[in-house]
Image (tube, rainbow, N blue to C red):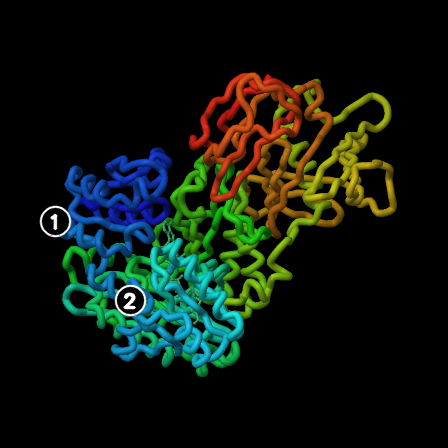
Amino acid sequence: MFQKILIANRGEIACRVAATARRLGIQTVAVYSDADANAKHVLACDEAVHIGASAPQDSYLRWECILQAAQDTGAQAVHPGYGFLSENEDFAKACAAAGLVFIGPSPSAIQAMGLKAESKQLMEKAGVPLVPGYHGADQDPALLQREADRIGYPVLIKASAGGGGKGMRAVEKAADFAEALASCKREATHSFGSDAVLIEKYVQRPRHIEIQVFGDTHGHCVYLFERDCSVQRRHQKVLEEAPAPGMTEALRAQMGAAAVAAAQAVNYVGAGTVEFIVEQASYDQPEAMKFFFMEMNTRLQVEHPVTEAITGLDLVEWQLRVASGEPLPLRQDQLRIQGHAIEARICAENPDNNFLPATGTLQVYRKPACTSFAVAAGAVRVDDGVREGDTISPYYDSMVAKLIVHGDTRAQALARLDAALAQTHIVGLATNVQFLRQVVRSPSFANAQLDTALIPREAAVLFHQEPVGAVRALAAVVAHTLHAERGLAGTDPFSQRDGWQAYGVRSRAFTCALGEQTHHAQLSYLHDGGLHLRVSPASASPATNAPSDADVSGLLQFSAQGEAGQAAEAGLWVSFHGQRTHSVLHWQGDVAHVFAPEGATSITWSDPLAHAGEVEVKGGRLTAPMPGKVVSFAVKVGDVVKAGQTLAVMEAMKMEHTIAAPQDGTVQELLYAAGDQVAEGAELLKLD
Ligand code: ADP
Ligand code: ADP
Ligand code: MG
């Protein structure tokens, strides 16, 4: 076994590999870019080497630098993780030339599986079933059109060198083919440097089911069962589970044998995944499912933890053992499936805005209680590469964490996933956590009616949901505010902010905004020490605060203690209007983020009392709303500007953002130049 390895990756997968290495007593070397100088994966390793600037092509893809780092630190092997250099046969060759073990398959196996069209020709010879299609070398557009007509519509055009859900076009009818082909070729040239395409029949009601395989240098190859990754957005995986719902023993054995045949056709060594597209006549006829080879990924897959959860194995340990020359730890007949596991990918993105990726700082990042790293039954596991306070930058992908749960049955795993998602609190950037909860609870997913169109099919229940009602969220914020005030006041009777006054009933008004709507609340301090709350209905404009028939009112009670048996965790139990719910609150300026078991919501709050006397002078500070690049300044020092006038343009995640003047003034100083990278909150210019 190796004494020291270098991990040529970042984020959660670098942390994941480091954890197993540590357990096996193997030293680890991290590499990092400028943006990752302080990253979690750097601290997870024993040593770390800086390899360049933040953009991947200046650091994580510079393999000469990475090999130099391995040699300088005396590492014997390189683990590439996924993405970056993991499927680059030149890198695998360069490792060998430098006397380092590449923890993965041979360069020739990577190359053979690297191109979708070539790998399909190879699979055809090995007797692996293929989707009816065309994957020839002749790329004459007229020929491609004839092939598409022959296959029959709908068809899918795929970039031969494509990956990551990019470079695919579905074509419904012959008349649309030429235009889709041209657009696919443009994207392919741009993203993959080659415009070669292949054409496939677009499988109806398709499920994505993949088989985990493992080969060693002694000629053994086994399959570690399947994962169902049908729940996708934009052809990218969102939820992954194992075993696949409805899978029969016979189909599993057939798919496993086909995957092993695929791997053996290229003398595969290490962890790999054979992806199949599965056609189903209906959701409840597993015996009628037909599977076809799509591609083989010659690396560890993002969703490998679900396989670990159902087999009780550590796949990174297997990778290290196999790479150091040991035989596979188990034979096929020793492998067993236990229970059911699901992984959810938590991403910084806005599902309600076409999954637009988001950047920002993880101001609050609370995870569910985890059952250690071990992949034992009943576990909740979080794999991540970030900590509270870290930034999700525009340089890398938007995945924040992977949440993996295991249960005896699918229903139990589902319930655990929903509960674990409810305990995942992220403030500071948009995430898909609430969206994932909606998917998990959607009828299609709950009833395992899976296919790759599940998300569009369930759109009505998945998007634009407000899981916590306004009245309940408001009551929670009022209760949390009062609770915090009591904590501050201590026991001194003259410091109590309990609204005591000698005459009449003291009351307090709150105004808040939930989405587009404004709500009013009136809190009265009763003489018996009780609290009475009246919540007025939503109004688009904050006009009056007069009582109306539509008001919801009643006594407000809250307690930091649960009933006997309930765990005393952070948060409050709030009773109002016949309902008692637990909630946790995180403040971000004037915005209260309410996390309740049914979901999370954000309210912009204004409590006149809280801010009385605190006149906030913001001055002329103009700060970057997100990390990104300054594209240009529209002003120079000495310019007199009007409120609303454009001062600068920033770019982040391929989008431009305009920074406008909040007030009239004179530009005093520009603190950056066009082209500079800036962190979130960095002061861009001074306005007098
Ligand atoms: P997988 O097929 O392993 O589940 P995805 O389909 O989500 O992974 O990823 C698509 C592609 O994007 C992969 O081929 C991988 O190369 C790349 N990728 C995914 N995550 C990362 C990452 N964190 N860093 C770099 N590349 C990544
Ligand atoms: P990538 O390299 O981007 O992972 P794949 O070829 O693996 O590309 O396909 C990604 C996804 O596209 C699949 O999971 C599936 O949802 C969809 N897909 C691919 N081929 C077909 C097909 N022939 N019919 C229907 N859907 C398909
Ligand atoms: Mg794929």
* Residue linked to disc 1: 99
Closer to the camera, 487 or 282?
282
Residue visible at 59% across and 34% down in the picture:
587
Which amino acid type is shown beneath numbered disc 1?
Answer: Gly
As drawn, the label of residue 299 is none
- The C terminus lies in which quarter of the figure? top right
Closer to viewer: mark 2 or mark 1: 1
Residue visible at 50% across and 47% down in the picture:
357
Residue 621 locus on image (x, y percent): 56, 22
Which amino acid type is shown beneath numbered disc 2?
Answer: Val
Closer to the camera, 119 or 336?
119
Q: Element at badge 1?
A: loop
Q: Element at badge 2?
A: strand
Closer to the camera, 101 or 170?
170
Q: Is residue 32 left or right of residue 379?
A: left
For the question of whether residue 43 can be seen, the reply is no
Q: Earlier in the sequence, mark 2 or mark 1?
A: 1
Residue visible at 33% across and 41% down in the picture:
41
